[in-house]
Amino acid sequence: MESILVNADYEIELFQGKKGSSLINKSLEFLALFLCDNPLFTRNTYPSEYLDHVEKLTGHRPVLVKSGPASNWWGPLKNIEHERWMNSKLTSAELDLAHGWSEDLQIIRESKDRARVKVPRQLLAKDAFGMSGMGLKAIRSIEDLHAIKSFPTILEPLLNRTHDFSHYLFPDGKCIAYQNLVDNKFQYRGTIFKNHLDPVANQLSFKHLLSDAMWYEFNQALMIIKTHYMQKPLETGFSVDSFVYEEAGKHKIHILCEVNYRRTMGRVAYELAGRFAKERPWCLFLLTRMDSVNFGLLQREVSTLENVMLLSPPEGRYQMFLLSAEDEEKGRDLFKALKQLLPYCQFAVDI
């Protein structure tokens, strides 16, 4: 059976032509142990108590290898120029500008372009080739622009985000929708499915906040985005990231935040839900932090809650959990119970 490499440093290798930090891969690679039986190519070691834990949950003993060929599990790295075009925030920003979906969206292609930039309100600067959610900078004045050293850079309005969500399009054309949990630094902290058995926009818990006309406009734009990015056959799927924001007491949709052509955390959450949540529709994939972890104790504590899975190893960057329930109300109660059970755990987001 072919080995797999969870190359979560995909964007770094794609755009810079070099391997990224092994810490990035280490923080995510163990998730593959729950989703496939292939040997995992890794430079890391995992204690036997963790491998026992994975085997108990999956029915398969993980196989770890440190040499030999392996296929990329996170991002393909096969057609580099096409993958760069797909993943570049410049591609999505140019599409956005062409259709006028966002106010005050601007592109700084090189340093001299800063002279023509307008700062009508607070903006958010994003590296066109950076990793999703990383290296973002708030721009409050013309002076802040001089701190930007990487080009091209995308400038978009810094809005009062209330709900982040994505649509993931698989190579076979299947499309799913889900809500992402993002902290106040725009860092990913989890994914919620109100109903992973029917993961469409109508199942998003915040859908009622926006008018049917707004959702119609969004769906029309989403069709344009899908068509634009499906000009060539897909090696893997891609996500279209969007968010809801509040302005002057009204909720609106920021149609196109970015596109990620690779496996995403939302897709992983969907795959985990399909394998472990079974017929329980509501599902939450959650990232938390702890200063120190006693894996045995944490494992025993979490096992006292029904339908809560501990996913992460003892020395993980994050402690990850999968929660599932019969409906949204019971899911929220389960989340509250987990917070009460682990008072020493840092929950960066609420639901």
Image (cartoon, rainbow, N blue to C red):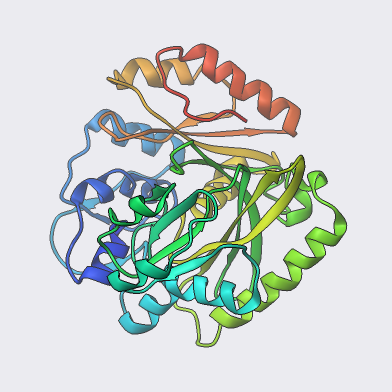
Residue at image location 48% in from the left, 36% down from the top: 184
| Frontmost residue, 139 versus 64 | 139
Can you give x and y, in whole percent of width and height, for residue 196 in the image? 67, 48
Q: Which quadrant would the C terminus be assigned to in this image?
A: top right
In the image, is residue 256 above or below residue 48?
Answer: below
Q: For residue 107, what is the image quadrant?
A: bottom left
Q: For residue 330, what is the image quadrant?
A: top right
In the image, is residue 55 above or below residue 271?
Answer: above
Can you give x and y, in whole percent of width and height, for residue 248 in the image? 74, 42
In the image, is residue 114 above or below residue 9?
Answer: below
In the image, is residue 67 above or below residue 162?
Answer: below
Q: Which quadrant would the N terminus be assigned to in this image?
A: bottom left
- Residue farthest toward the left in the current orientation of the protein: 67
- Residue farthest toward the right in the current orientation of the protein: 212
Residue 98 located left or right of residue 75: right
Residue at image location 67% in from the left, 21% down from the top: 333
Residue at image location 73% in from the left, 57% down from the top: 200
Can you give x and y, in whole percent of width and height, for residue 79 in the image? 34, 83
Can you give x and y, in whole percent of width and height, for residue 125 in the image? 41, 56
Residue at image location 50% in from the left, 87% down from the top: 232
Residue 208 located left or right of residue 21: right
| Frontmost residue, 51 versus 297 | 297
Q: In this view of the protein, can residue 1 be seen by the observer? A: no
Q: In this view of the protein, can residue 103 be seen by the observer? A: yes
